Amino acid sequence: MMKKFFFKIALLFLIVFVILSFLGESLTKMNPYSKFVSEFESSIKEGTNYDILFYGSSKSFCSFNPRIFEEFLDLNSFNLGSDAQRLETTELVLKNTLKKQIPKLLVIEINELSAKPIENKKILSFQFRCYDAFSFDKNKLIQSFNQISFEELPNLYIKAIRNHKGWKTLSKNKNDDKSNNIYLEEDYKGYVGLQLTIKNPERYDSFFERKLDRNKYDSIDLPHEDVNAITNILNICSQYNIKPLFVTSPSIRELSMEKHLQFSNKLNLFLENKGLDYLDLNFHVKEIGLSSNDYRDVTHLNNLGANKVSEYLSKWIYQKYNIGKLKTFISPKEYIQNGSFEKNNFQINYSLTNDLIISRVDYIKIKPRKMALIIGLETKEGVTDLNKYRMMYHALPNNIFLNKLSKTSIKKNRKFEIWDFKPTIQVINGKKYIIHVVDSQIEKLKTISLGLYSSKGYRGLLSSKLVFDFK
C-alpha cells in the first residue's frame, strides 16, 4: 500500500511539474537570447564553421559586430553575449557552445562587474534568461546549484512560478521587445546595434581627452572572487585546448572611474602572469576615433561606435594572431596622390556652370560600407567655395548589386540611390577636387548622374545633367 501511495505522490508531482513547465512557456516573454542561441546551434548543424566566438555581458553584444569581422578579416563569427552575463553564467555558455564547435579564437568581454555576486532580482532575471536558452542537462544542473541560491532554483526551472503574474499579459508575452525598437539599426549573429546618441554628449567630451597611464596604479592582487571566476573560465578553455582573449569594451563610465582603471591594471598583471592576452579598449579610444557621440548611454556603444570598435579589434586580432585575411582600403587622397585617379578614367571636361568644369569623375570603396565620389575640377580664378550650390548625385548600381540598395531606395521602389549633397572644394597637390563619402554596401556602379542646383531649394538644374557610364 505504501509503495502505491508514494508512487501516486511521485506521479502527481511529475504531472504538476509538466503542467507548470508547459504553462511557463506560455507565460514567458520571447527571449531574444534564446533566439540567438537557436540560430547559432542551427547554423552549426547546417555546417557553418566559426572562427571567432564572443562572450560576455551586454557590453559584448553591443560592441562586437560579426559583420565587421567578416568584412575586414573574412572571418565568420558569432556573438553569444547576453544582458549582465556574469562569468559564472559564461561558464554555462562556454560548456554548451564549445562542445558543439571550437573556434580559432574566444573573445570574452570582461569588466569589474563580471565576477560580482548577483546583487538584485533584476540581475538574477538576466541570468535566468541566459539559462533558459539552453536545454536541461548535467552541466546546467551543476552550474545552477553552484551559482543560484537554493530558494531561487524553483524560479529558474519552473517558469510558471517565476512568471506567475504573466496571466495578465498572456496575449503580449510572445512579443520580442527588441524587434519593435525604433532605434534598432542592426541585428546580426547575436550583435544588437542601436543607433541613438547619449543625451547631452558634450558633457562627456573631457573624458576622451584624459591621458590614461597603467603605471600610476598599484599592483595589488585581484579580488578573490575575480580570480576564482577567471580561473574557472580558463579551466573550461584548457579542456578544449584554446586560449581566450579577454577584452574590456570602452565605456564613458569606465573612462571616468579610477576604480575601473585600477581593476584593469590588476587584471592585466594577473593575465600577463598566466601568459594570456588582455586588451582594455578604454586605453585606445583616441586610436579608435571614439567620441561621446558614439555612445547610447554611459555604458554602451551605439551602432556607429560599435562598428568603430569592431574595425579596430579586427585589425588588432589580425596583427596579434595572424588569422583571417586583412582587407586594405585606400583613402580618396591616397588614390589621387598615387596617380590612380588620372590613370583609371579619361578626361571629360564637362561644364556644370560658366565657372565650374568637371575634368574627371570616379568612385572608390574606402571601407566595406563606404564609397567615395571623386570629381576633378577646373574653376575660374577666385572661385574658392560652392556655398550657393547643391549637387545632384544619383547612382545606379550594377544589376547584381540592386539588392544592396539602401532601405529608403528599396522602400520607394527605386533602382538607384539619391545622394545629393552640398559640395566643397578640396585642394590636393595643387589641384581642385570635390570628394563626397556615402554609406553604401554597393560594390560597383553602372552610371552616375551629376548636376548643380541652387542651395536655396530645387528649382531645376542650372545646366543639363552629366551622366557618366562606368564599363
Image (cartoon, grey):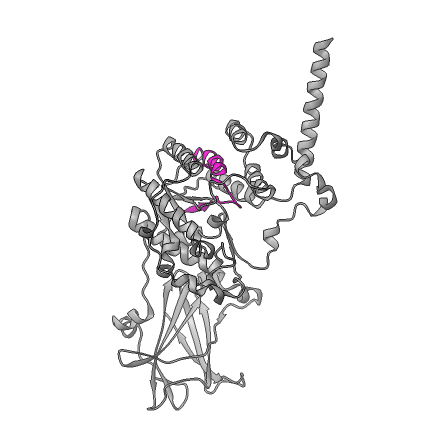
Q: Residue at x 36, y 44 (%)?
A: 266
Residue 380 to residue 465: above or below: below
Q: Nearer the viewer, residue 328 or 287?
A: 287
Q: At which x and y percent is residue 362? A: 35, 73
Residue 67 to residue 136: above or below: below
Q: Residue at x 39, y 32 (%)?
A: 235
Q: At which x and y percent is residue 303? A: 48, 58
Residue 98 inside the magenta-drawn segment = yes
Q: How many marks?
A: 0
Which residue in the rendered view is the most extreme toward the left? 338
**Where the C terminus falls, by quadrant?**
bottom left
Q: At which x and y percent is residue 302? A: 49, 58
Q: Residue at x 52, y 41 (%)?
A: 37
Q: Nearer the viewer, residue 407 or 348?
A: 407
67 to the left or right of 174: left
Residue 173 to residue 204: above or below: above
Residue 180 to residue 269: above or below: below
**Where the N terminus falls, by quadrant?**
top right
What segment carries the magenta color? 76-99
Q: Is residue 210 visible?
A: yes
Q: Is residue 71 visible?
A: no
280 to the left or right of 409: left
Q: At which x and y percent is residue 34? A: 56, 41
Residue 146 inside the magenta-drawn segment = no
Q: Nearer the viewer, residue 147 or 93?
A: 147
440 to the left or right of 325: right
Query: In which image quadrant can residue 15 be found?
Result: top right
